[in-house]
Image (cartoon, rainbow, N blue to C red):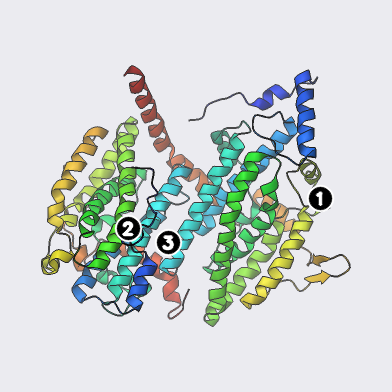
Amino acid sequence: MSGESATRITPGNALRPEDVAERVAGGVKVGEDVGEYALRLGDDALILAQRLGWWISRAPELEEDVALGNIALDLLGHARSFLTYAGSAWGKTEDDLAYWRGEPEFRSCFLVEQPNGDFGKTIARQLVFSIFQHELYSRLVDSADETIAAISAKALKEVDYHRDHAIQWTIRLGDGTEESKRRIQAGLDSVWPYVAELFQDDDLIERLGGVAARPSEMREPFDALMAQVLDEAGLELPDVQPAMTGGRGGKHSEHLGYILAEMQVIAREHPGATW
Amino acid sequence: MATQTQSPRDTQLQPVPSAEDEAGQAYFDKIIAEDSRIEPADWMPAGYRKTLTRQISQHAHSEIIGMQPEANFITRAPSLKRKAILMAKVQDEAGHGLYLYSAAETLGTPRDELFDQLLSGKAKYSSIFNYPALTWADMGAIGWLVDGAAIVNQVPLCRASYGPYGRAMVRVCKEESFHQRQGFEILLELASGTPAQKQMAQDAVNRFYAPALMMFGPNDDESPNSQQSMRWNIKRFSNDELRQRFVGMIQEQVKVLGLTLPDDKIRFNEETGKWEYGELDWNEFYEVLKGRGPCNAQRMERRREAHENGAWVREAAAAYAAKKAQKAQVA
């Protein structure tokens, strides 16, 4: 990590949620396939932000309240941009999509829906997701869709920090005390069944060609960095079977219902209201 | 992590002042008379150090406990934009806690010790956070009234005679001012929304008005420590002066919101040039202070729980750092 701010916006090629909203208001409209793809990107970021937001005021150190809060805020920013863009396919806003869709309409993966558990499990989930997301955005900066490319350009700088945070904590916990080693290993074991889903190709990916990043191609660099981190941390690569999943097709874990119930409750008590 | 350092206080509690102490006192008095700044390495009276340590750490504790009522709504914020703003705000509060603990540490008490004082109940935090945040509108009322009262209290503290405190307050006040504006904006949006939203906003203002006024502390004749703090240029205005200023401010702003304050005695007294308001329920204030507010137990339990659940993480970080240091030494 250099000393530059992870959240500084580079003029020209990085889009904030407000910029995307402006483009959409100006008539930019995506096709349904790109919209569907943007939903996947947005929903992963939104659900993980929702999970991480819980930690603010509950972290092991004040510095971690700030760090986890910052990561959650970055992810929420990505979610807002991608959902705003996705919504242009169906004439919906980011809030229409976040608050008024039911479980089967969400496109998030199982991994981000997993409960926070202890700090070890949260870091394990962060490690997997940030390495994956880093590979993803590194490719999407070259997407044939210029809005997706621009959102990814801003997000990539932030995810670079998220990945660094997760790697540093994994090493610290792996090489800290007996207890921390046991906990981070247990965390990795418990999220590992949901890793395979991140790297599955499907028809949408085939149809989108140069717009999307091909998940299966990211598995090798993911495994390589993961092996390096686990080696340095003195941890074992989990020997756990992948679970049957289906988040991209709207089939979710049991957890999502509770996440949405909490996230959507106030908005749904006041249909038509603005905030 | 916690190291037992000898506090500079310990060396100053000597019955007979040494020549060094006398010279130190003379320098201190001169700095105060000039309305200039005392810095950490300067000599200072034991009482000054103690008062500041208590005040700054209480302020830090208030920031940390104050995260809770708002953090409650992060997962439920009714729009993604509001969720982002609220997350950033609660994160700022953790940041304020960090600056303030650092400022307090310059007086010789380590953060872990200050934290233990909070967890053991020995140290206090602002009573306002022992009231519950019940609806989304409370996010607005807390921003507008609670952060608003905090600003009125804290702007004069930017000129506090203790350098690290004054400088920390400059940054804190800038962020608080943003927080207050976002709280006002939440209420404005609600007040111009549906009847249910407007009702929610009015209800929140009704509940937070009196507790916010009590944030300035007891009436002047009930506040014995204030005079000494004013002589030391820590405090610049009395509790009642600040409270009157705040009432004048919010009674103008509430008109813009199209809401009302739950106090029909508010008036500007032309003769005294001061704002007047209805009698506050100081009985309630002291009850909450003694731990019998609606959320005292809940707030402390949550803080202790976070601290205890995080113990293994802090131990791991310390063990890892020690291993690293050892390796560096060998190499």
Give the residue number, with chain letter if any, for mark 2.
A154
Q: Nearer the viewer, residue B331 or A108?
A: B331
**Structural distance between the alpha carbons of marks 2 and 1:** 55 Å
The label number, if any, that marks residue B75 in the structure image: 3
Instruction: Say above or below: A42 vs B117.
Output: below
Residues indicated by labels 2 and 3 sit on the same polypeptide chain: no
Give the side of residue A145 with respect to residue B230, left or right. Answer: left
Left-right relation of A234 to B57: left
Foreground of the two, A146 or B210: A146
Residue B132 shows up from this direction? no
Q: Which residue is mark 1?
A: B222
What percent of the width, then of the height, locates residue B285? 71, 55
In this rendering, the label closer to the viewer, 2 or 3 = 2
Residue at (21, 48) in percent of width and height: A192
Instruction: Residue B282: give x, y in percent of width and height.
Output: 75, 57
SS at mark 1 in the image: helix
Q: Is residue A109 above or below residue A187?
A: below
Mark 3, secondary structure of its residue: loop
Binning the other alpha carbons within 10 Å of mark 3 as few (below 14), some (14 to 19) or many (20 upward) gives many
Q: Give the alpha-carbon distance from disc 1 to disc 3, as whole Å.
A: 41 Å
What percent of the width, then of the height, locates residue A118?
36, 45
